[in-house]
Image: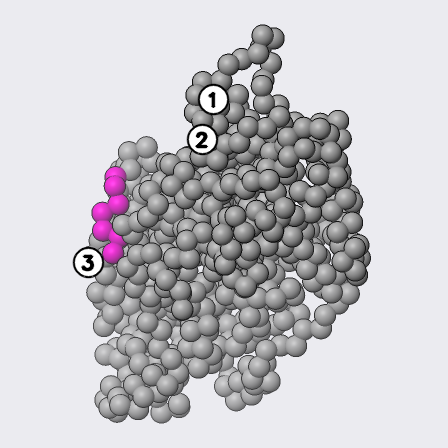
């Protein structure tokens, strides 16, 4: 079948090099270079490639050739194979797998999955449904080490990223000969036994912790997603969310690809594997990036090579670190700190980073470039660990400075300032410091005769960290009582005093109302609520589990109406401009969709805050019509006598969570 495109394989050329150290890297020259200039040349699709290197260098892709400056000689090695190598007996294999490709593989639900579903619903009640913020997405990590196995460093890194996802955890490694994978539902500590880590051989690998935002809660959606195909093996970990995943899935399904999950990570894996048939590794990644639209921070394994890719807008965080015997890429620098490593820098938006498999360095390819970024401001407000550094800013300091700006914009004189644990702590600290420097009117604050703070910063709510997430709350009275199970007020701090309580966000307002009542019951004379972020008025489509507009209290209510709803004496939010100022970014370089309703991506039925060109994905009907219009001569073989078209189809093995891709080369007479 034809997809209406010229599928003539593209030739690969050797990468030539001379000298340049990592510290002397040059600016990226032409990120929008045409990588299809040689599309009419022919080469055996069964070729495979190996890129070896020993230093870190920035690379770019010129229009007509690849020429890099490094201190080593790098060659792309091409091994030609005969037509019979790896061929598939269509009469047997195609028929034997027809049942696998007709629909999705049934997956039975275990009690553990049911419990995870219940856990998710409870988290939505205690987080998304409350004032404690939306729930987070995923965390990714990749390592390349020279002197030890990658499994344990990956394991420790996933622990450091556990806050980004609690539904599943997985690691994929490669020992230079084969890929090893272990993916399980649950927390990192539950997903891995000592014996599991011992089976994950090899010095390179990637890992993932998942909170489901695209796809369901089941083993098929757990990551890393493993793929084995004719040109090698792939492992893929994804943080983010694709906008056009369904369009690409429909196209690939019409080409014979079968999917085992409803998540967008598998779509990326299929697309990348397909492009690797026609291109070398760098070009395959670039072509994949040109086709997918949305938010993604990826760690990928192609055989023993670890890659890191950040979407052109840089929506999700991704950074590079150096450890004693290699390099690390991770969602947050806290994972690098856990390995006693040093943060090198953030992966740039639109950049591909390739770690040397021997841990000696990395290569950088600036594949795309945009006039503006779309960094998610909520990473600094809520999601990231306070001890992480994102875009050269320590998250803890960013939150303290947001608290200071909150005082400048929305300050109210009270006796005590207290956080909602744990998310409001840094905001409240900065807010209280600013309150002791100036009055709410902006005048200098007079100090007391003893030098004590006029405005007290105190922990007035103690959090019970041992309440199970699946606590049964069948009635409204019991649900309200659950707040007292999780948070207990310190009456001596609150009784007879005016209180300002600070949190990072209000989503539905349910818990905010209960907290205000809790403080009033403890004897507070006044309860004022301050939020270290703007009002959340719209859902997130970029990988954050956030409520719909119908469930967002700020979507159709004014600040005064929300104040009345939660029964606070006053309510104040931080402005969007203040967030941008604190983060040192222009508004146009931030993703503000959830607080403005205008998004940096082309999303159906939503406003866009910039000029965006969404990739045009051919649907099945388009390809069929295009195929019918081709002449017989166009449907013939390429100039070297090889078929100009390949029919790609995929066979799955759901039991071990891997995908076996078989690529058949068939002449048009056989179609």
Q: CA distance from mark 2 to mark 3?
A: 54 Å
Q: Measured along the vertical axis of the image, is residue 222 above or below residue 414? A: below
Any part of residue 412 in sight: yes
Tell me which label, 2 or 1, sits earlier in the chain. Answer: 2
Q: Measured along the vertical axis of the image, is residue 352 above or below residue 649? A: above
Q: Nearer the viewer, mark 3 or mark 1?
A: 1
Residue 478 location in percent, x, y?
Answer: 79, 54
Asked which secondary structure carries label 2, the reply is helix
Any part of residue 185 in sight: no
**Cβ atoms at labels 2 and 1 below 8 Å apart:** yes
Residue 402 location in percent, x, y?
Answer: 47, 35
Residue 98 is inside the magenta segment: no
The residue lying at 53 percent from left, 21 percent from top is 436
Tell me which label, 2 or 3, sits earlier in the chain. Answer: 3
The residue lying at 41 percent from left, 53 percent from top is 596
Q: CA distance from mark 2 to mark 1?
A: 9 Å
Q: Is residue 481 left or right of residue 219?
A: right
The residue indicated by pointer 1 is 438
Q: Measured along the vertical axis of the image, is residue 56 above or below residue 118? A: above
The residue lying at 32 percent from left, 32 percent from top is 23
| Crowding at mark 2 (Cα within 10 Å: few <14, some 14-19, many 20+) | many
The residue indicated by pointer 3 is 64
The residue indicated by pointer 2 is 408
Q: Is residue 241 left or right of residue 286?
A: right
**Cβ atoms at labels 2 and 3 below 8 Å apart:** no
The residue lying at 64 percent from left, 64 percent from top is 217
């Amino acid at each position: 079948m034809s997809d209406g495109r010229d599928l003539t394989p593209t030739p690969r050329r050797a990468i030539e090099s001379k000298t340049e150290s990592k510290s002397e890297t040059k600016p990226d020259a032409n990120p929008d270079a045409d990588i299809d200039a040689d599309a009419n040349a022919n080469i055996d699709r069964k070729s495979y490639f190996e890129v070896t290197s020993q230093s870190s260098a920035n690379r770019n892709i010129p229009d007509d050739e690849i020429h890099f400056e490094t201190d080593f000689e790098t060659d792309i090695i091409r091994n030609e194979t005969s037509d019979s190598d790896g061929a598939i007996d269509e009469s047997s294999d195609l028929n034997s797998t027809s049942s696998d490709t007709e629909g999705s593989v049934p997956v039975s639900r275990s009690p553990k999955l049911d419990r995870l579903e219940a856990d998710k619903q409870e988290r939505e009640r205690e987080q998304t449904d409350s004032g404690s913020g939306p729930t987070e997405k995923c965390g990714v990590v990749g390592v390349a080490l020279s002197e030890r196995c990658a499994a344990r460093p990956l394991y420790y890194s996933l622990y450091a990223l556990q806050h980004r996802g609690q539904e599943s955890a997985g690691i994929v490694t490669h020992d230079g000969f084969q890929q090893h994978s272990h993916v399980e539902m649950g927390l990192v500590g539950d997903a891995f036994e000592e014996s599991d880590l011992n089976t994950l051989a090899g010095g390179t690998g990637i890992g993932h912790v998942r909170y489901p935002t695209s796809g369901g809660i089941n083993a098929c959606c757990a990551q890393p997603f493993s793929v084995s195909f004719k040109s090698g093996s792939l492992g893929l970990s994804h943080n983010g969310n694709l906008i056009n995943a369904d369009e690409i899935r429909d196209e690939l399904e019409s080409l014979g690809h079968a999917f085992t999950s409803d998540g967008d990570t598998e779509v990326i894996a299929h697309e990348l594997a397909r492009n690797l048939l026609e291109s070398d590794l760098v070009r395959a990644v670039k072509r994949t990036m040109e086709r997918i639209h949305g938010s993604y921070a990826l760690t990928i394994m192609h055989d023993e090579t670890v890659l890191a890719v950040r979407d052109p807008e840089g929506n999700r965080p991704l950074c590079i670190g150096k450890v004693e015997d290699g390099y690390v890429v991770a969602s947050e620098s806290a994972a690098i700190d856990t390995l006693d490593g040093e943060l090198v820098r953030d992966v740039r938006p639109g950049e591909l980073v390739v770690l040397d498999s021997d841990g000696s360095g990395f290569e950088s390819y600036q594949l795309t470039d945009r006039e503006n970024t779309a960094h998610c401001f909520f990473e600094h407000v809520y999601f990231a660990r306070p001890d992480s550094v994102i875009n050269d800013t320590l998250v803890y300091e960013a939150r303290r400075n947001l608290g200071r700006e909150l005082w400048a914009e929305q300050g109210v004189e009270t006796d005590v300032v207290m956080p909602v644990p744990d998310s409001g702590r840094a905001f409240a600290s900065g807010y209280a410091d600013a309150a002791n420097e100036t009055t709410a009117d902006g005048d200098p604050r007079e100090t007391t005769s003893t030098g004590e703070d006029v405005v007290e910063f105190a922990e007035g709510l103690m959090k019970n960290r041992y309440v199970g997430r699946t606590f049964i709350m069948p009635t409204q009275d019991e649900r309200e009582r659950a707040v007292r199970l999780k948070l207990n007020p310190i009456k001596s701090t609150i009784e007879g005093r005016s209180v300002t309580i600070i949190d990072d966000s209000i989503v539905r307002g349910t818990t905010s109302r209960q907290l205000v009542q809790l403080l009033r019951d403890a004897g507070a004379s006044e309860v004022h609520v301050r939020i270290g972020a703007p009002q959340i008025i719209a859902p997130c489509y970029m990988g954050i589990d956030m409520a719909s507009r119908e469930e967002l209290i700020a979507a159709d209510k004014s600040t005064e109406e929300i104040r009345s709803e939660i029964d606070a004496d006053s309510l104040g939010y931080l402005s969007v401009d203040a967030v941008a100022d604190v983060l040192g970014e222009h508004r146009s370089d931030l993703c503000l969709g959830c607080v403005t309703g205008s998004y940096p991506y082309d999303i159906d039925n939503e406003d866009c805050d910039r000029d965006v060109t969404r990739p045009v994905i051919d649907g099945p009907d388009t390809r069929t019509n295009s195929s019918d219009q081709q002449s017989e001569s166009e449907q013939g073989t390429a100039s070297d006598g090889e078929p100009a078209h390949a029919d790609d189809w995929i066979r799955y093995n759901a039991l071990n969570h891997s995908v076996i891709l078989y690529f058949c080369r068939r002449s048009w007479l056989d179609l």
